[in-house]
Image: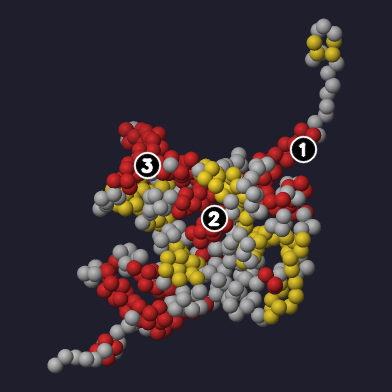
Amino acid sequence: MPDNRSDQEKFPNSKKFSDFREEISIIELAQSIGYSMTTAWAKSKRSGNFPCLENQAGDRIYIKHPQDNQRMRFQNVDISSDEGDIVAFVKNRIDTDFKSVRNQYSNELGAINAVLYNYLNIPEQTRNEYRKVSTDGNILKTGTSDEGVFNKELFRLHKLTDTAWLNHRGIDQDTLKAEIFKDKIYNIQNPIIRDGEFKGHSSFINTGFPYQESLTGNIVGLEERNFDFKGHGVNSNKNVGVWFTNPPNKIDNVVLVESALDALSHYQLKKPENVIYFSSGGQLTTEQVQTINKVLKETKIHTETKILLGHDKDKDGAMYDLKFIADMAAYRVPMVKAVRDKDFVKLSYATENNEKMTDFANKLMAKLMDYNKPVQVELNKLESNQANDQQAKEILEKSMYRFNFEKGVFKVEIPRSYYAISDFNKSFLEVTGLEKIVSLEKGKGNDWNEDLMKNKSQEKIENNQPQHVKNEVKNKGARL
């Protein structure tokens, strides 16, 4: 006799993926496998809108819609394709964090279900601990509103009249009056919030740079600066929004920098024409890259437009360069995985049965080998002299690129140093052909404002030099 019962009647305890989304928070599940909201990076980047988590392998994610399990999504800050709901979170980690479960099942779907069922079977007391961590410490709520959404109306925005801090950082009035910066810099008084209620505005006046998500979109955040102060307006959507200057009628150059101050400094030093600047506020997420691309599509960008990566001349700046060019090249050479540990940035590219990707990998390896050669020479000297300097050997080994093909995947490990990452970026641009439109624009110092300040100091020294007038002697030249 046929069984006409529904699946729910046959299997009363079975669940659909929509049920798992409703019952399990990505934040809780991530913490159960070792992700933390209290690492230095997670604490520095989190906001009311976007709690951040990081694991020991350097895998960094932020959470959208943190108070609504059904709408909750995660985004990996280094891999644009690693994003989605609770099911995607498990699927993308089924062969790593959940490998022990995966080995018990012949198919991926069964393993994903098992992971989610296993989590629901964790004692409620243990799950409560993960929930407690995710809501304590003003991580999800900042006290300005129940939604934790940036509200421009809470701030008092003034026309830029107090320029003391900007002048202190070497920025001239002529630069501030330039058309590209019009209405892109404010004086700001922050709201005072006590017990969740608005009490007025602070008497302190900061310099503020507005973040937007589109060319004509509303302000979604504020980067704020002052003497001995650097921060963001409360609930600023700094993981998606970016600061950018007014676009000219024709854009010849796009310059990406880490702060609006760097943009002002670069402009004052270089005086480029037909330029638009973007600042990511000392970070660069996948969604910020998407916002930059969105704004550029809304402007009159053309095929000859050059993109200049002017991030700081340090390890983090080189990482932001890598992040941008990897996302930009994704349609040509898609990356399947990117992780960071203490010593290396590890990238993976699928090459199996793909002649184009294999060619890319071989060309890239050839360039990376050139970088490794002088280091290998020093390593050979240590070994030939039978020097028992293990520490020196480890330092040399960790300063070399590592690469190999494994099961149809090209894997490359980049030493986490400015010079190694920067060299990789140059090689990557050459191999992919992106060097025709993207270049690495670096100053002499760590950042553009440092260059400007040194330039100002030099000008001051030269202007204060006494002027010696040399007497001329007829037919005998100058008297020395």
Q: CA distance from mark 2 to mark 1?
A: 43 Å
Q: What residue is drawn where x is 41% and y is 47%?
A: 414
Residue 420, position as x, y percentages in the image: 45, 43
282 displayed left or right of 325: right
Question: What residue is rendered at 35% in x and 65% in y?
Answer: 92
Q: How many other residues sit within 10 Å of disc 1, few (<14), some (14-19) or many (≥20)?
A: few
The answer to whether the residue labelled 3 contacts the one labelled 2, judged by CB atoms less than 8 Å apart, is no
* Quadrant position of the N terminus in the picture: bottom left
417 relative position to 214: left or right: left
- Judge left or right: residue 466 versus residue 84: right
Q: Earlier in the sequence, mark 3 or mark 1?
A: 3
Label at residue 364: 3
Query: Which numbered disc, 2 or 1, marks the residue that appears first in the sequence?
Result: 2
Q: Amino acid at mark 2?
A: Lys
Residue type pointed to by label 1: Lys
Circle 3 — which element? helix
